[in-house]
Amino acid sequence: MKQISILDSNYSTTKLCYKFLSDNYLDESGKIKENLKFSVTIPELNIINSKISKKENEEIDTYIFFPEGENRRGEGGLRTKGYIKFSYKYENGKWWAIDFRGNKLFEVNLPKKVLKDIERKKIRELPLVTIVTVVLNNKEGLEKTIKSVINQTYPNVEHIVIDGGSTDGTLDIIKKYENCIDYWVSEKDKGIYDAMNKGIDVASGKWINFMNAGDKFHNDSVLMKINLSDSYDLIYGKVILISNDAYNGKVIGRKVKKDDFFFKMPICHQAIFHKKDAFEKIGKYNTSYKISADHEWILRLLSNNCSMKFYDLIVAEYLMDGFSENKLLLSKREKFLISKIYFSNSNLKASYLYIMSVFKSIGVKLLKKLGLLKYYRFLKS
């Protein structure tokens, strides 16, 4: 039976950790030695040369550490100090560590502090949730997001931070909370979806949520309110929009059907929990789409007969002043191309919607120039 511990720091709450590397792998600073970094082999954890290889019919490998990329500015987190996280399941009177594929790894001894709480709530499964945060030069927003993840009362959370090479002090924030971040890297990437794909590559969780810098969970108990033992490929809820205009404070989110994705993304990725296994099945985000790759991925998921479930609760607070809000025409064009692929019998409808959306975008820009945009938004809402 292996001991699962809680790492204490000035910031962390009861998050579970397992020390998978002995001190022989670590240098004087407590981080993994560079010459051993890519030679970690632990067959009982399915780790070979610091990688969990994809199986037949799977699309992606899972990495423990990233090879050095372009203009790397730093790397760290609990994983570089020898700690890793798993899902846990109670079966036949015992708790077991489970990997993201659902394989039973080894019997574990959970800390009494955690056992007392989950036994009171009759919890018999603790799936690991990986939160991926993408950031570039947004130190204030990143700190807000990190605190939101730390404060979740759910005890089994992994936090991955992918920084695009920030120069504004973002790295200082990352290092400030390093004992609460499982893995982080700072280096140049090819855009937001490339960064999100990197997060997928190192995620150990059964579920993956993308909570980018500036966004946050609606409250500290969100993850406790969702049944993370669900067998669905994707579960999602609502968001509150945070902006400086008429949309501020608006709650959006509802149960959606495939047709709802015809020419728009009707759910926000901040409120989505993607099963890691779904990325294994259908691959990661298509980075040829600069704004709408999440839209295309969900249509790809639905085209593979995967399943979705809606939770009628507010999951996140979404900061609207983001990338896609400033690129309306490109967004419309990408959605048009996506709709043609996945709704091949509806090209006429797609063309009509595309043309109308372009006119609407031009009208929005004109109203903005005239200082009248708030009236359009009030009418639209």
Image: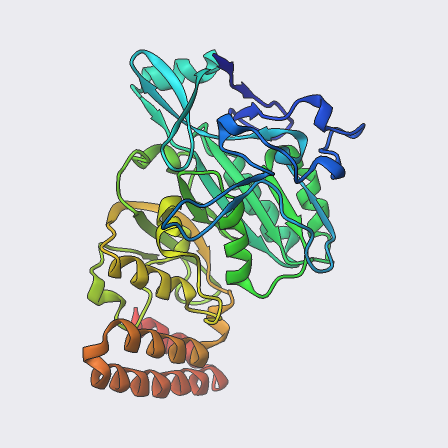
> Can residue 277 be spotted in the picture?
yes
**Rendered view: 269 above or below 41:** below
**Rendered view: 303 above or below 46:** below
Pinpoint residue 294: horizontal percent, then vertical percent: 40, 62
Pinpoint residue 64: horizontal percent, then vertical percent: 58, 40
Pinpoint residue 156: horizontal percent, then vertical percent: 45, 30
Report the quarter where the C terminus lies: bottom left
Q: Residue at x 44, y 38 (%)?
A: 205
> Can residue 213 be spotted in the picture?
no
Relative to 259, is 216 on the left or the right? right
Q: Nearer the viewer, residue 118 or 307?
A: 307
Q: Residue at x 63, y 47 (%)?
A: 66
Q: Nearer the viewer, residue 75 or 122?
A: 75
Quadrant of residue 247 in the image? bottom left
Pinpoint residue 173: horizontal percent, then vertical percent: 68, 45
Seen as rendered, the residue at the extreme front is: 56
Q: Residue at x 35, y 49 (%)?
A: 278
Q: Residue at x 60, y 34 (%)?
A: 180
Relative to 47, is 166 on the left or the right? right
**Rendered view: 302 above or below 172:** below
